[in-house]
Image (spheres, rainbow, N blue to C red):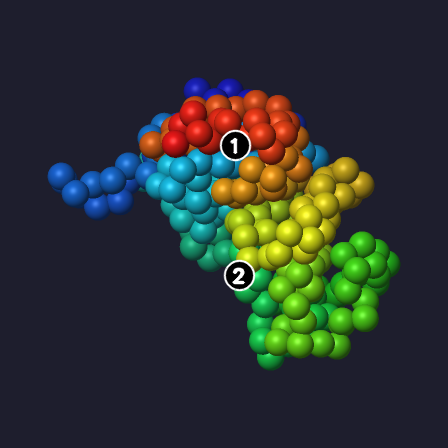
């Protein structure tokens, strides 16, 4: 990717050029992002870390089309998000982006099967039965398909959320602290599912996390501080991720 111009690169699934995001005006203005340029190739697992207020969540929200930059360019699958109307942006998120949230965001009135199929239902599409079966067996919730969220543990709910994010075969999955509300075993299970989705399904995953252990599952680690990328490198161990965080903390 040409990060200086934001020119499209067919091998880069998500790319951003010179992203800035300012909140407020005048002396009260806060720059959450200050000229961030970055690209994410397909079939890879990237983790984004940074101290509180570093801009990591803002970056993910802009890359995912949940927020708009003050300036700069974002492309997902070659489509320029900054040129889209709100309606077209909503459709792009529905069709091409999967989301996994810390708080699961399952609909309480729907059972697990209905929650997983919700993105397809909203789009008016029929599920691929073979793909659905593969997903539910991969995430291990076949015996919970008729259960509503209140009848499942946090780990089971997040497994449903992972399947929901993958059901439409999105261009990219954005995971916002996906293990943040889970115990250590359930956290490991969910992180291994994301790793599996990348390695075996060719999925692209971009994850924001504060957890060094979670970051160690990724192929690549980015660290933000004061709205800028201060580290961008290959996979690291939990200890190395902690050291990087201490160096910018």
Point 58% across, 30% down: residue: 239
Q: Look at discs 1 and 2 and give the one toward the viewer.
A: 1
Residue 73 seen in this snapshot: no
**Percent x, y of residue 230:** 43, 24
Asked whether disc 1 touches disc 2, contact meaning CB atoms under 8 Å apart, the reply is: no
Task: Decide: few, some or many residues near mark 2? Use Cα within 10 Å; few <14, some 14-19, many ≥20.
Answer: some
Task: Give the Cα distance between marks 1 and 2.
Answer: 24 Å
- In the figure, residue 238 lies in which quadrant? top right
Which type of secondary structure does the marked residue at label 1 adopt? helix
Residue 178 is tagged as none
Q: Which residue is mark 2?
A: 103
Which quadrant, please, contains the C terminus? top left
Q: How many marks?
A: 2
Residue at x 46% of width, y 31% of height: 245
Residue 100 figure quarter: bottom right
Q: Which residue is mark 1?
A: 242
Nearest the camera: 235 or 40?
A: 235
Residue at 50% x, 56% y is 90
Q: Considering only order in the chain, which callout, 2 or 1, is on the residue closer to the N terminus?
A: 2
Q: Nearer the viewer, residue 70 or 231?
A: 231
Give above or below for 225 relative to 30: above
Whole-percent x, y for residue 184 in the image: 64, 52
Query: Hey, which residue is sitting farthest bottom in the picture?
Result: 109
């Amino acid at each position: 990717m040409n990060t200086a111009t934001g020119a499209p690169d067919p091998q880069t699934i998500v790319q951003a050029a010179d992203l800035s995001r300012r909140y407020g005006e005048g002396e009260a203005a806060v720059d959450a992002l200050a000229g961030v340029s970055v690209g994410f190739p397909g079939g890879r697992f990237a983790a984004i870390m940074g101290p509180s207020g570093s801009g990591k969540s803002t970056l993910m929200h802009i890359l995912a089309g949940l927020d708009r930059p003050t300036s700069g360019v974002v492309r997902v699958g070659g489509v320029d998000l900054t040129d889209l109307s709100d309606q077209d942006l909503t459709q792009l998120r529905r069709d091409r982006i999967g989301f996994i949230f810390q708080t699961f965001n399952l609909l309480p009135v729907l059972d697990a099967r209905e929650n997983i199929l919700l993105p397809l239902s909203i789009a008016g599409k029929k599920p691929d039965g073979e793909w659905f079966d593969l997903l539910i067996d991969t995430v291990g919730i076949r015996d919970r398909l008729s259960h509503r969220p209140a009848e499942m543990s946090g780990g089971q709910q997040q497994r449903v959320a992972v399947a929901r994010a993958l059901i439409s075969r999105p261009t990219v999955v954005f995971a916002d602290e996906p293990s943040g509300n889970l115990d250590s075993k359930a956290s490991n299970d969910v992180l291994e599912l994301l790793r599996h989705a990348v390695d075996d399904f060719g999925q692209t995953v971009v994850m924001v996390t504060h957890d060094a252990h979670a970051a160690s599952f990724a192929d690549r680690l980015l660290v933000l501080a004061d709205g800028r990328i201060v580290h961008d490198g290959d996979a690291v161990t939990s200890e190395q991720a902690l050291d990087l965080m201490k160096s910018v903390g």
